[in-house]
Amino acid sequence: MRRNHSTTPRTPRVLAALLLLAAAGAFTLGAAPAAEAAPTPLNRVVPAPASVTPGGTPYRITRATAVRVDASAEVRGIGAYLAGLLRPATGYPLPVTDRGTGGIRLHLASGDFGAEGYRLQSGARGVTLTARTPAGLFHGVQTLRQLLPAAVEKRTVQRTTWQIAGGTVQDRPRYAYRGAMLDVSRHFFTVAQVERYIDQLALYKVNELHLHLSDDQGWRIAVDSWPRLASYGGSTQVGGGRGGFYTKDDYREIVRYAASRYLEVVPEIDMPGHTNAALASYAQLTCDGVAPPLYTGTQVGFSSLCVPKQVTYDFVDDVVRELAALTPGRYLHIGGDEAHSTSHTDYVSFMDRVQPVVARYGKTVIGWHQLTGAHPARGALAQYWGLDGTNAAEKAQVAQAARNGTGLILSPADRIYLDMKYTSGTRLGTKWAGLVEVRRSYDWNPGAYLAGAPASAIRGVEAPLWSETLTRSADIEYMAFPRLAGAAELGWSPAATHGWNAYRVRLAAQGPRWDALGIHYYRSPQVPWPAR
Ligand code: NGO
């Protein structure tokens, strides 16, 4: 008791002294080494920029740096987004202003930038991003972000220096369509989960978000004229969970958020197969007038809308009209895959009737590549999801359609289906298209992929993520990262920059960034990740 009494008062003093020492140490450590750290080389970015000219003094972001924008609401919005990204970790005020000189400047100008390109110039006095369009500036911001230390992604103040290497990046995409698909039908994902993924896609300059809104297991979008689609058809999911659906306001919010990240939403209603959730909701859509039960398994190819019935086209018209009205984007995806319960004749006549409906409501048709077995409408795009080295006849049919003017989006399943397992040990995903490690996913050329298809037919690349086995954001991330970054690079970067050995180094540099962002990713042994 006495002993305690005598020692107690001394303890806080000792502790305080120790804390002071520690704080001093931290201060010295924090100030010194980072100042010496070399800035990230201008080409250590994913997707690889089209051209990089390094040289000159780096720009250093300080407490005095301002984000200087053109006097335009949209450019100011991008400036605010950038400042919002940088403020937490730098702890700097980073005011967004249309006055002054130096600092980080976002500027629209005419020039040879294309619809999404930009130029980044960095030197002692500042960094200037120039583009013809806001989208170009936004993509430039993602490059700027990757040129800063990964710690910039943390949400608390980090003690380091924030330098951007000197020189010029001149960049523009190889393809206009750079997509990612999320299957919200097999398992439902909330608006917040979708928005989290949108932020991750934006970092890699992906500009199309394809939402797979309906399938056998769930209908996920409210349709006023057919309310049971969502209320009943959306009430479950794979494994029998509660499912869910987006109200029209939810969907508008996703569209708005995507647009703020320069992504266009491509909604998909899969037809005439993959429609059990709709058939279960409305018996009149079936040929025998008997509604099947809701389905929570993972088989495919067993359901079909009733092609000869008029009510089918009333239904399609209503759904397409309401969805088109909600969607500012150019496209409406009508599925068309795995219609194994629809005869070929019915499939062709269904597609002949449905494609004009999409056009009538002002949208361009996208369909899975089976659409090329029918009569793709003028201007329609077909999304190829086959494999290397299989089904030559089907490939020839797709190539023929491409020669006849059908544009192609490439999503080869054994390359960029993000739901394929990486190795036999991957807990999530499936392997019907094979095991797809990071290198296999990256190492192919979209421009030369489909023999007989003219290069001009290739409109872009999309990485689909099917959700039979995925229930959480962490699951989405583990399957998407790192492969999504590779798919994004195939869509953006010129073929001349392609090369696994350089790519894996650039990819490895993303690891600490994903750690800082809390992205749960697969640490593939093929990639030289820095130690954690
Ligand atoms: C296929 C099938 C989907 C599956 C997916 C799983 C297409 C276009 N249809 O891709 O229903 O979910 O594989 O990888």
Image: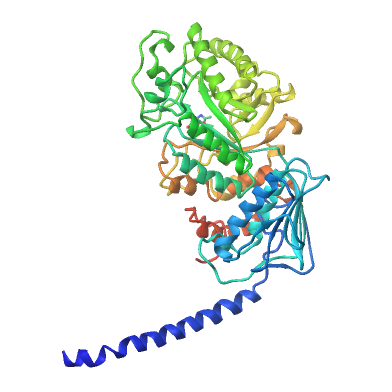
What's the residue at 45%, 22% (across, down)?
301
Q: Residue furthest right?
A: 111
Residue 218 coordinates in the image, percent (x, y) = 41, 28
Q: Residue furthest left?
A: 1
The answer to which image quadrant residue 237 occupies is top left
Quadrant the N terminus occupies: bottom left
Q: Is residue 240 above or below residue 522?
A: above
What's the residue at 52%, 24% (across, down)?
269
Residue 15 coordinates in the image, percent (x, y) = 36, 85
Q: Is residue 321 above or below residue 453?
A: above
Front position in the image: 16 or 122: 16
Q: Left or right: where does residue 427 sit relative to residue 249?
A: left
Front position in the image: 131 or 479: 131
Asked if one can make out residue 517 in the rendered structure from this viewpoint, the answer is yes
What is the basis of the colouring in this image?
rainbow
Q: Is residue 337 above or below residue 284?
A: below
Front position in the image: 513 or 10: 10
Front position in the image: 279 or 142: 142
Residue 351 coordinates in the image, percent (x, y) = 59, 15
The answer to which image quadrant residue 501 occupies is bottom right
User: In this figure, what is the number of numbered marks?
Assistant: 0
Residue 2 coordinates in the image, percent (x, y) = 17, 92
Asked if one can make out residue 171 in the rendered structure from this viewpoint, the answer is no
